[in-house]
Image (spheres, rainbow, N blue to C red):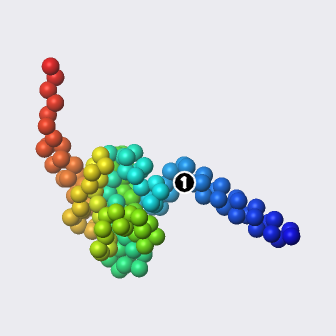
């Protein structure tokens, strides 16, 4: 009986802790936001620019990208950039895998104000940062200028 009470209390505490983590925002690993099916949309809306790595843990290309991606995230944060780098384990977060019709790993998507384009840049930290800067600059240049009346 005592064992059953202990197990029930443990499970209750685990659920409360999981809800608390979810309520405080995404987990951050090495400067990279860890997104899930549950918190994805909220975090994409919360940031103007987000590069998202949809990966599979068993994928060799994904494993090689991981440290470079983390270096880029940390460098962007260190320079005070508002751009966020995020990742999604698409083998676990299957709703996102289906939504974005993933056919291979890693798949990187660059979101600006909730709209996305496929990332087509290099897979090293400096290249990731340069591609983001160039893409944002091109988008800003293409945006219509606002005139005051």
Quarter-wise, where is residue 4 in the image? bottom right
- Secondary structure under badge 1? helix
**Which x, y percent locates residue 91?**
43, 73
Closest to the observer, 131 or 117: 117
Q: Residue at x 16, y 23 (%)?
A: 148
Taking the image as shown, residue 47 lies to the left or right of residue 30, namely left
The N terminus, quarter of image: bottom right
On the question of residue 81 being in view, the answer is no
Q: Which residue is mark 1?
A: 22
Which quarter of the image is occupied by the C terminus? top left
Q: Is residue 105 above or below residue 19?
A: below
Q: Where residue 138 sits in the image (x, y, percent)? A: 15, 49
Say whether residue 131 is visible: yes
Closest to the observer, 68 or 50:
50
Numbered marks: total: 1
Q: Residues within 10 Å of mark 1 (few under 14, many from 20)?
A: some
Residue 144: quadrant of the picture: top left
The residue located at (76%, 61%) in the rendering is 9
* Residue 28: percent from left, percent from top: 48, 57
What x and y, as percent, mark residue 89?
43, 68
Name the residue at 34% across, 60% down. Answer: 52
Give the farthest residue toward the right: 1
**In the displayed structure, does residue 146 sit left or right of residue 116?**
left
The residue positioned 82% from the left and 71% from the top of the image is: 3
Q: For this rendering, which residue is in front, 80 or 13?
A: 13
């Amino acid at each position: 009986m005592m064992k059953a009470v202990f197990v029930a209390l443990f499970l209750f505490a685990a659920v409360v802790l999981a809800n608390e983590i979810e309520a405080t925002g995404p987990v951050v690993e090495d400067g990279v936001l860890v997104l899930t099916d549950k918190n994805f949309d909220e975090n994409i809306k919360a940031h103007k620019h987000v590069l998202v790595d949809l990966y599979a843990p068993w994928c060799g290309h994904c494993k090689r990208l991981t440290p470079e991606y983390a270096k880029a995230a940390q460098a962007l944060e260190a320079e005070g950039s508002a751009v966020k780098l995020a990742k999604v384990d698409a083998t676990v977060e299957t709703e996102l895998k289906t939504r974005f019709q993933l056919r291979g790993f890693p798949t990187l998507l660059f979101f600006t104000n909730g709209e996305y384009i496929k990332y087509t840049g290099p897979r090293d930290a400096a290249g990731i940062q340069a591609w983001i800067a160039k893409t944002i600059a091109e988008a800003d240049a293409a945006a219509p200028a606002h005139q005051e009346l």
